[in-house]
Each structure stands twice: as C-alpha cells, then as structure tokens.
Image (spheres, grey):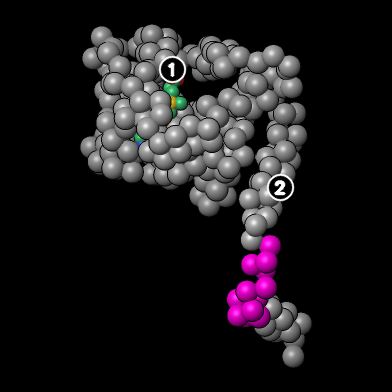
Amino acid sequence: MSIRTTKLKIIKFSKDFLLASRLLQILQPFNNLFGFIYNFNLLTSWVHKNKKANLLTNDFYRPIRHYDDRLKSFVAIADHYQLHDTPVCYLEFGVASGNSFKWWLQQCRHSSSRFYGFDTFEGLPESWGVFNKGDMHSPIPEVNDNRASFYKGIFQDTLNGFLDENGSSIRNTRKLIHMDADLFSATLFALSQLYPFLQKGDIIMFDEFNVYDHEFMAYRLFTECFYINLKPISAQNNFYHAAFEVV
Ligand SMILES: C[S@@+](CC[C@H](N)C(=O)[O-])C[C@H]1O[C@@H](n2cnc3c(N)ncnc32)[C@H](O)[C@@H]1O
C-alpha cells in the first residue's frame, strides 16, 4: 500500500470516527475562543507582513486615533492616482448619510465620472459587534449632482441588476470601490459580484479592514478564492482603513 493510500485511510477513519462519536463537541463552548485565536492570528501575521509595504500613507499603533484619519488616505489616493480630473467610476457599498460619498463626489470633478451608492438606507441588515440590525439607518442623501445615483436595498438584491445594466460601461473606467458596509456577508458578496468587472489599476478601499471576522475575513476569502492580487497602497490607524490596487 502506498504512503498516499495509507494517509487517505487514516484521514477517512479519523473523520468518520469524529463525526460518529461527536467527541470534539465537548469543546463546543470554546468555539468562539478558538475562532477568535485562529482568525486574529491570521490578521496579526497579515498586518506585520504588510506594514513594511511601500504605502502612500501609513499610521501604526498611535495611541490617539480618529476615524477621520481615513481622510489622509483619501487625499493621498486622490492625488497619487490623479482622480480629481480624470474619469472615475466610484462605487460605494455602505453609504448611510453619505459622508465619504459626498467627499469623493466633490473631489472627483471630471464630468464623465460616475458615482454609485448602494445601501439599504434602513440600516444594517444584521447585527455587527455592538451595533444592532437597523442601526446606522439614514435616508438617501441629498446631492445636487447628476453624476450620482443611489440603489436602495440589500446589495444581494440590487447589485446584480445594476451590473447587468452598467457592467460594460464601468468595466473600462478606473474603478474606485469603497467597501464600507462593515459586515463580512455584505463585503464578500459585493466583491465576488464585482470580480468579473475588475481591471488592473482599480482601487479597493476598506473602511474597517482590520476587523478580523468581518472585512478582513471577506478580503482574505475573496483573494484566496478568486486568485486575485491586491497590492496594499495605503493604511491608516493600524490598517483600520486600508486601500489596495488591483495588480
Ligand atoms: C458604516 S455605514 C456607512 C458609512 C458611510 N460610508 C460614511 O462614510 O459615512 C454602513 C452602511 O452599510 C449598510 N449595509 C451593510 N450591509 C448592507 C447590505 N448587505 N446591503 C445594503 N447595505 C448594507 C448599512 O445600511 C449602513 O448604512
């Protein structure tokens, strides 16, 4: 019997035994702890490897941090990629009252630029950390700019219809994708659907990247399952906000 056949037999026997005996279920009360340790260690390794990358902005382990530090990253990206006066397709997933959406709308002045905002506008569709389902609800923001449009509903319902209609026009414009839905489910869904439309040079920003079981997990599964290479270009607040270029 070859070594491979022996290994397969041992694996099969062990799996059948564990399923039949339910032995590991005695550890079930520790599921969250084991999950936390495993996933947080993946994040820690990732951060330590990537903080040495050549980033437009970076800011690690500062004692006092502010959410608006992400603006430093926005400014650096807009300047570096000359987004002020060249056509860009801005897609934001998680708009709420439109803080970041309006910022980009003001900064990217080219008349051919287009801005698409996706949100339930009824708040989070599921709980996230200390936030409950329905938190962060906000009406569709008022913007006086006909380059902008909003899509109300969960991404799982709105994004595919949008891509059917606009996919060919967004494919060849530089895309600036802002993932700010906070949730693992929403982030992974949106990234997976956008995958066929991504081109080299597109930029993907994550607003809560270093949340180990949400945006980071979505990033990890997306890059692993789609074999896509995302180069880190900017980070703020110890990768709480992180941006990548499709290479
Ligand atoms: C943190 S807020 C967005 C903040 C906004 N980008 C800003 O800078 O002010 C997150 C938003 O994501 C939305 N969201 C989360 N999951 C969603 C989903 N699956 N479909 C649609 N919207 C979702 C929530 O409704 C919420 O308004």
Q: Position of residue 100 (x, y in %)?
A: 43, 17
Q: Is residue 17 magenta?
A: yes
- Position of 142 compared to 9: left or right? left
Disc 1 Cβ-to-ligand 1 distance below 8 Å: yes
- Span colored in magenta: 15-27
Depth check: give the residue in front, 86 or 22: 22
Who's the residue at 25% across and 9% down the image? 144
Depth check: give the residue in front, 18 or 133: 133
Would you place residue 231 above or below residue 192 in this image?
above
* Picture quadrant of residue 15: bottom right
The residue labelled by disc 1 is 100
Disc 2 Cβ-to-ligand 1 distance below 8 Å: no
Q: Position of residue 109 (x, y in %)?
A: 36, 9
The Cα–Cα distance between marks 2 and 1, rounded to whole angstroms, is 33 Å
For the N terminus, the quadrant is: bottom right
Who's the residue at 38% across and 44% down the image? 193
Dominant secondary structure of the residues highlighted in magenta in the image: helix
Res. 163 visible in picture: no
Depth check: give the residue in front, 19 or 192: 19
Residues at circles 2 and 1 in contact by the CB criterion of under 8 Å: no
Res. 122 visible in picture: yes
Mark 1 or mark 2, which is nearer the start of the sequence? 2
Depth check: give the residue in front, 45 or 110: 45
Q: Position of residue 111 (x, y in %)?
A: 30, 12
Return the mark for residue 232: none
- Position of 82 compared to 115: left or right? right
